[in-house]
Amino acid sequence: MAGERALGPSERVQDYTARFGRFLAEQVEPLEAELATKGLGTVWAPALDDAGRMHRDVWETRREVQRRSAAAGLYNPHVSADVGGGGFTRVEMQHVEEYVYRTAGLGLGLCGLAWTEGANPAIEHCSDAARGRYLDPLMAGEISAAFANTETSVGTDVLAMETSARRDGSDWILDGNKAWITNAHFADVLQVVAVTEPGAGTRSLTMFLVDADAPGVTRGRDIPTMLGDGLTGELGFDGVRVPAENVVREVGDGFALAMSWINWRRLCRGGMCAGWGYWLLDRALDRARTRQSGGRPIADLQAVQHLLADIDADIYAARSASLLAQAELDELGPYAIPLHHDAPRLISLIKVINDEAFFRVADNALQVHGGTGLLQNSPEEKLFRVARNLKIPAGTVEIQRNAIARGLLRR
Ligand SMILES: Cc1cc2nc3c(=O)[nH]c(=O)nc-3n(C[C@H](O)[C@H](O)[C@H](O)COP(=O)(O)OP(=O)(O)OC[C@H]3O[C@@H](n4cnc5c(N)ncnc54)[C@H](O)[C@@H]3O)c2cc1C
């Protein structure tokens, strides 16, 4: 069992977090101060352009953090050592992610660790030619990516997607539309999942790397979500020619690769929710100690103490469960293709436990702040919206329960 394994931060995690702390102070804070003078909102509540997209200057400031982080050797700890990443285990990444989210809060520093714009477990399987063209520049923070799986009429039911690719000589021709894509407006390379063998079930899909400026690619409208970040949009593909070298891994591996990408996002919930959870708890404790009611701090009131205790209990339980599951997954191979049959249940446990615990944490933290917590774009209000959002992307909480039950019943 994972309980016997070391679950604390390794030496290289301690080295990473010390360096990341210095990076925030020396490289990110000046950029944050400069952004604050521009009147473009904040990173978590950015000004939007006329089309509803994140203002380009905010976007460019984020990109600068990514480039600086890559130069400092901090951007890719999660990427396999085989392709030049840090090769950190999932337990190590949970500690790294927790540190980054707790320390950066909602600030620019979050961009110092590759998020969905960066390298991911699926793109690591690209060809040597694609590696030089896409993966290396992604890891250097020179370009950014988007994962294009969902369509307007197909979300959960991935195998019903309509975007398709057909062979033309050694090339492929891609046609279709994608929706709800994070970074659709700005990405340089698109990881597109498309049908290549209709009716072949989990072998029916293939993942392609597509230049966002290739003829036939269009960026659609912004899809304004409750996150208000101007980062979610549509993509169109009309007879887009894609060379064979841009097929990721093998034809027919698209479903497995899409699941690698999605599972990566599910696993990241562990550190993200613990980090943001403790950040909210620290802010709630400060507020409880300083806000007065009836001539004494609200921290003296049992009703408020219980809110604080519930926050702590939720974070502690979700963090502990996540670390155990990440350790078990490190042994099974979290992104192996094919995935070990016990892995999906563990991955879904991490996602559903964190999504639901963090929703309660964000709700209770906001409650401690009273009306101030409801102020539009206050950190508590923004993270309450983020927490609500988390239960849907990368597979809804219902779908996680399906995977957990499947894992149990096949035993
Ligand atoms: C902010 C944001 C960012 C996103 N970023 C990306 C991205 O970068 N790339 C990308 O490809 N996609 C992205 N998505 C899409 C996201 O992954 C989907 O929204 C998600 O998978 C759910 O699909 P859906 O919205 O179509 O919901 P539906 O599939 O329509 O589900 C609706 C409801 O039915 C339930 N349901 C559906 N099928 C089942 C079932 N078989 N069993 C039980 N319950 C079921 C669901 O749980 C849900 O409650 C993003 C979405 C959002 C909101």
Image (tube, grey):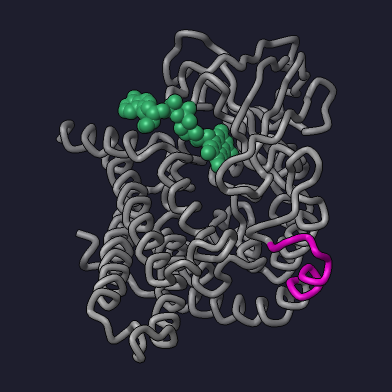
Location of residue 250 in the rendering, given as x and y in whole percent from the top left corner: 56, 26
* On screen, residue 281 above or below 80: below
* On screen, residue 261 above or below 63: above
* On screen, residue 117 above or below 406: below
State the extent of the magenta-drawn residues as a range: 32-42
| Residue drawn at 58 percent across, 59 percent down | 376
| Residue drawn at 41 percent across, 44 percent down | 391
Q: Quadrant of residue 209?
A: top right
Q: Indicate the quadrant containing the C terminus: top left, top right, bottom left or bottom right.
A: top left
Residue 119 or residue 302, whichever sits in front = 302
Residue 194 or residue 82, whichever sits in front = 194
Is residue 181 among what the camera can see? yes
- As drawn, is 41 to the left or to the right of 381? right
| Residue drawn at 65 percent across, 82 percent down | 22
* On screen, residue 77 above or below 130: below
- As drawn, is 261 to the left or to the right of 2? right
Location of residue 123 in the rendering, given as x and y in whole percent from the top left corner: 61, 41
Magenta span has 35? yes
Location of residue 195 in the rendering, given as x and y in whole percent from the top left corner: 56, 16
Is residue 257 among what the camera can see? no
Q: Quadrant of residue 149?
A: top right
Q: Quadrant of residue 15?
A: bottom right
Residue 26 or residue 252, whichever sits in front = 26
Q: Indicate the quadrant containing the N terminus: top left, top right, bottom left or bottom right.
A: bottom left
- Which residue occupies the extreme bottom position in the image? 295
Location of residue 56 in the rendering, given as x and y in whole percent from the top left corner: 81, 51
- As drawn, is 132 to the left or to the right of 44? right
| Residue drawn at 78 percent across, 26 percent down | 218
How many labels were placed on the picture? 0
